[in-house]
Image: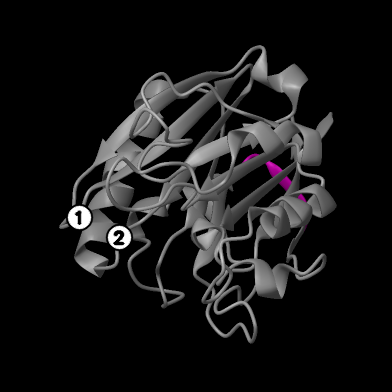
């Protein structure tokens, strides 16, 4: 049995709650969490050519992780696709294949599916409108059934304020909301979630507030330790 530590973190373009741009704070948070795999949201600036907000050159040195290879990011100087990327340990990255999943909705959105031997990680940043989120989760669930025949972990910023609405398409998954993660200084809402195949065993989970996380973004990161059969 293998234990893997996964995490999800909305970086808010490395600006903290209101600024300034200080990616070293976010990197310190990621390093302190010690994840094997972490799905990140808002890693690029939003407008223009969408340059990276999280500097690619600093990631491995400060966290020990590497970005997954996204064949076509959002722009020439972008780190991610639709503002998202996945970081993982270098030895895992050697066998990783990334697939981009375009999503429906009122605003451009997409998910990233990272295939590893025996495990598929899907990173998401869902829309601001519940009807869009429902359509996006339905698309992701349908795609996951086609591209993954093994263990699936879906995680990210679900942007869903309600614990019981909008998640109907995840009926086949175990959905975990580790705790309030937004807004970071005084979290009240469980916007960040992890959904996993029901045969995976959840050992521990939580919201990470150490290493200056309350100042590094408007979201706190979430994490889970999972046993793979």
Q: Is residue 213 magenta?
A: no
What residue range appears in magenta? Answer: 199-204
Label 1: state its secondary structure: loop
Q: Is residue 198 visible?
A: no
Label 2: state its secondary structure: loop
Q: Position of residue 109 (x, y in %)?
A: 28, 47
Q: Quadrant of residue 25?
A: bottom right
Q: Quadrant of residue 86?
A: top right
Q: Main secondary structure of the magenta part?
A: strand
Few, some or many residues within 10 Å of mark 1 (<14, 14–19, 20+): few
Q: Residue at x 22, y 48 (%)?
A: 108
Number of callouts = 2
Vertical comparison of 147 with 31: above or below = above
Which mark is drawn over residue 107? Answer: 1
Compared across the picture, whether 103 is left or right of 14 comes to left
Q: Earlier in the sequence, mark 1 or mark 2?
A: 1
Q: Position of residue 97 (x, y in %)?
A: 52, 17
Quarter the N terminus occupies: top right
Q: Residue at x 45, y 37 (%)?
A: 80
Compared across the picture, whether 23 is left or right of 99 comes to right
Q: Is residue 1 visible?
A: yes
Q: How is the image coloured?
A: one colour
Residue at far left of view: 106
Distance CA(mark 1)–CA(mark 2): 7 Å
Residue named by callout 2: 127
Q: Position of residue 218 (x, y in %)?
A: 55, 72
Q: Are marks 1 and 2 in contact (CB under 8 Å)?
A: yes
Quarter the C terminus occupies: top right
Q: Position of residue 142 (x, y in %)?
A: 31, 36
């Amino acid at each position: 049995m293998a234990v893997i530590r996964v995490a999800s973190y909305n970086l808010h373009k490395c600006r903290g709650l209101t600024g300034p741009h200080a990616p070293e704070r976010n990197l310190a948070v990621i390093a302190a969490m010690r994840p094997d795999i972490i799905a990140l949201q808002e890693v690029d600036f939003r407008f223009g050519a969408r340059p990276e907000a999280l500097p690619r050159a600093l990631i491995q040195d400060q966290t020990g992780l590497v970005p997954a290879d996204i064949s076509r990011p959002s722009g020439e100087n972008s780190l991610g696709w639709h503002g998202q990327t996945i970081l993982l340990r270098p030895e895992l990255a050697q066998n990783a294949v990334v697939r981009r999943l375009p999503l429906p909705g009122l605003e451009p959105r997409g998910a990233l599916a990272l295939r590893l031997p025996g495990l598929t990680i899907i990173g998401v940043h869902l829309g601001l409108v519940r009807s869009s989120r429902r359509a996006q989760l339905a698309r992701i669930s349908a795609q996951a059934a086609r591209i993954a025949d093994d263990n699936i972990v879906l995680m990210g910023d679900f942007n869903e304020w309600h614990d019981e609405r909008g998640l109907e398409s995840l009926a086949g998954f175990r959905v975990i909301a580790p705790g309030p993660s937004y807004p970071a200084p005084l979290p009240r809402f469980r916007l960040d979630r992890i959904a996993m195949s029901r045969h995976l065993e959840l050992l521990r989970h939580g919201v990470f507030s150490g290493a200056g996380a309350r100042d590094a973004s408007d979201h706190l990161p979430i994490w889970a330790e999972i046993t793979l059969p």
